[in-house]
């Protein structure tokens, strides 16, 4: 069964179990996302994909909200854009300000989102988390301080690889993705498949060889562009 809704004044017909994000994609409307990944189950943690229900004024996470018949959605209202920027700033407020030296510079979805939403300053400041880097394994490097708790690595390890080497632990501000007993990734049942690094939207998990290979393959001009366009995010 299909239903019809309106997104940014465009009528769209989708299956009744579709999400707003899927409906928007169908008519070519781009909504920013971070925790969403098309190959993984829905999670709805980052709230960067919020849109406005024009009737009620409610803000809805488009990646986890199912469509309903006659719904009228605005993806670009002032309320939705402000909420997206605020949610992104909250993520950046507890994220190291070291884009220029990060292994993921130029390939980071968080950096892209900040750039696309025009976030160059963070309005929030306060305590930040500081975790040790796990760099002892053969192929993967984990930097939990760069984690935005999107859960993509946890889901891909469980749902695609069937390994469950990574999991959330603690609560609230202390929440972190880690290994069993917080052991180095090299000492657990990790298969070093690299799927977690592939889906990680930041530099929290990277493949050791991948970055140097990509960077080495770039022309000098491209490297220059990457460094020049990296947003410099300052706490205010
Ligand atoms: Fe929708 Fe993260 S992408 S909540």
Image: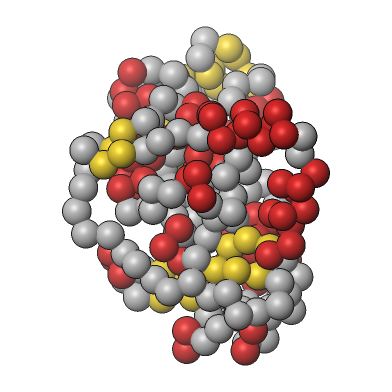
For residue 79, which quarter of the picture? top left
Q: Position of residue 231 (x, y in %)?
A: 45, 33
For residue 141, what is the image quadrant?
Answer: bottom right
- Relative to the observer, which residue lies in front, 102 or 185? 102
Quadrant including the N terminus: top right
For the point 62% across and 89% down, the residue is 187
* Depth check, front residue: 7 or 30: 30
Extreme-right residue of the structure: 217
Q: Residue 66 location in percent, x, y?
A: 53, 39
Q: Where is residue 200? Give x, y as percent.
A: 59, 55
Nearer to us in this view, 144 or 52: 144
Q: Say left or right for 47 vs 124.
A: right
Residue that appears at 53% across and 60% down: 204
Please state, as top left, top right, bottom left or bottom right, where the C terminus lies in the image.
Answer: top left
Extreme top residue here? 9
Residue at point 32%, 26% (across, down)? 82
Examine the rendered structure and indicate whether residue 52 appears above or below residue 192. above
Q: Which residue is at 50% across, 27% downward?
A: 116
In the displayed structure image, the side of residue 195 where residue 95 appears, left or right? left
The reply to whether residue 140 is in sight is yes
Q: Is 32 or 123 nearer to us in this picture?
A: 123
């Amino acid at each position: 069964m299909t239903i019809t809704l309106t997104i940014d004044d465009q009528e769209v017909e989708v299956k009744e179990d579709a999400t707003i994000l899927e409906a928007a994609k169908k008519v070519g409307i781009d909504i920013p996302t971070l925790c969403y990944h098309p190959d993984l189950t829905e999670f709805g943690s980052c709230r960067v994909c919020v849109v406005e229900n024009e009737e009620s004024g409610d803000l809805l996470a488009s990646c986890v909200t199912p469509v309903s018949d006659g719904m009228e959605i605005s993806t670009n209202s002032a309320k939705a854009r402000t909420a997206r920027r605020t949610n992104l700033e909250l993520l950046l407020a507890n994220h190291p300000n070291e884009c220029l030296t990060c292994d993921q510079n130029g390939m980071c979805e968080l950096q892209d989102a900040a750039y696309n939403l025009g976030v160059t300053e963070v309005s929030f400041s306060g305590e930040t988390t500081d975790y040790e880097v796990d760099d002892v394994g053969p192929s993967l490097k984990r930097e939990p301080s760069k984690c935005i708790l999107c859960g993509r690595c946890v889901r891909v390890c469980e749902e695609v690889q069937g390994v469950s080497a990574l999991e959330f632990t603690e609560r609230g501000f202390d929440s972190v993705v880690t290994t069993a007993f917080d052991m180095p990734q090299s000492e657990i049942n990790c298969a070093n498949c690299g799927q977690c690094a592939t889906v990680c939207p930041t530099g929290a998990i990277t493949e050791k060889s991948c970055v140097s290979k990509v960077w080495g393959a770039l022309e000098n001009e491209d490297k220059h562009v990457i460094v020049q366009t990296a947003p410099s995010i300052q706490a205010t």
